Image (spheres, grey):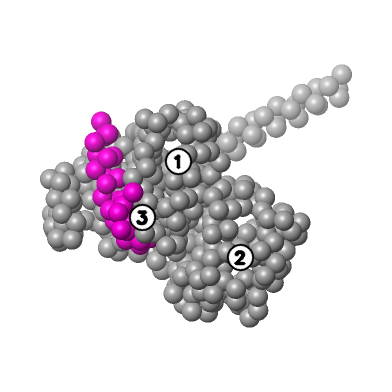
Amino acid sequence: MKNLVSLKWLFLMVVISGLFLNSCTDSNDPETPVYEFYISDQNKAEVTAQTIKIKLLFAQIQYPEISNLSPKVTNDIEVHKITYRTSLQGNKIKASGLVYLPKTAGNYPVMSFQNGTNTVNKDAPSESPTSDNWFMLESLASMGFIVVVPDYIGFGESSTSFHPYLHAESTTQSILDMLRAVNELSTEDKIVAKPTKDLYIFGYSQGGWATMQLQKEIETMHSQEFNLIASSCAAGPYSIGFMNDFIAKTTDYPMPYFFGYLLNSYSLLKLFPNPLSDLFQEPYASKIPGLYNGINTGGTINAALTTKMANLLTPEFRTGFDTNAKFSVLKSAFAANSVAPWKISTPTKLYHGSADELIPISLSNKLLQDLKTAGTPTEKIEMITIPGADHSGGALPAGISTIGWFLSLKK
């Protein structure tokens, strides 16, 4: 009996101690919300609607169709760098990006923009928030959207990491987590622009591929979380295997740094077991790992490589990739990170320049047919060819057309 009484007193003391400690913690801690994704943000710039209208006025000299957009510019905006939590191959990592917010209180749809290939840390969106590269995004925010621009892993807050170039899992995860972080940021009193569940997505080149991967992930896995209204995918390398075949078998490829970026990234991700010397000839195989350091531009990397594919790539890689068993794991990695066709449910537009010398228009045409074969209704998808446009020349026309389309769908 004595032992039973002692145990009761011990249990009571533990409960009382626990209540006391909890009450001390609650009373001493500031009332700061704990977010799952959002970590912090910085106000990097503020832009008036008048400034945006002036920029559009100059731009319409070259692109007259922009004149239709200027009257829709109404809001001053603020530009924030946001830091948030995401993951890379199961490892927690901090990432970042830009958020363009109207300064007029209200509820706004969200547009996520995925940018094209970049190798330089200082050119990441959050490191260059006032760059003219983003003026169309400023414009869209002023027209009544919250605009989200991920840096991608390997840039901005995560610049100490390598960039997992054209890696589907980490790309879609980092974009989704940024969208979630923006929702958490919006609960702060200082943010007057509140996001709705309506989401529009757009990307060019690498960003076109990322947008299509994001669309599939949302439609098949997260349709209850995001109300995807429209998707615009432009000039993307949707099939990595197709691009591998196109580049490896051509005589001259003007941007060899794309291919080095891809294979070096997949090597660092351990997606295949081969040394780079199985793929690249010397002296290039030894050079490639050091070229992607966040400082070298694509032009600098190109100059350290060669446009002659017979000199850059090993003969067995160029001619035996499809049949040689030593490349089978890499071949599977290409397939796993390509866009697998599915029955699309969101209105989608594919843009591509007819004279694109880096990512051929035949790739978008093939994707279009594959998506239709997978059951996508004709009314859900449209292919738009930009006449005479090469890879860089197609970006702004695709962007202007996309903005006009998104505005026409906006509630």
Q: Amino acid at mark 2?
A: Asn
The residue singled out by tag 3 in the image is: 354
Report the Cα–Cα distance between label 3 and label 2: 29 Å
Tell me which numbered mark, 3 or 2, is placed earlier along the sequence.
2
Residue marked by disc 2: 264
Image coords of residue 265 (percent x, y): 59, 62
Residue named by callout 1? 368
Q: Secondary structure at mark 2?
A: helix
Mark positioned earlier in the residue sequence (1 or 3)? 3
Q: Nearer the viewer, residue 257 or 254?
A: 254
Q: Which residues are magenta?
A: 385-411
- Residue 256, given in percent of the width and then of the height, sits at 51, 69
Mark 3: secondary structure: loop
In the image, taking residue 265 as reference, residue 63 lies left or right, namely left
Q: Is residue 59 magenta?
A: no
**Mark 1 against mark 2, which lies toward the viewer?**
1
Image position of 122 (left or right of 284) = left
Q: Is residue 331 above or below residue 106?
A: below
Can residue 180 be seen from the camera position used here? no
- Of the residues shown, which amino acid type is indicated by label 3? Ser
Q: Are marks 1 and 2 in contact (CB under 8 Å)?
A: no
Dot 1: within a 10 Å radius of its alpha carbon, few (fewer than 14), some, or many (20 or more) residues?
A: many
318 vs 268, nearest the viewer: 318
Per the model, the C-alpha gap separating discs 1 and 2 is 29 Å
Residue plotted at (56% across, 67% down): 260
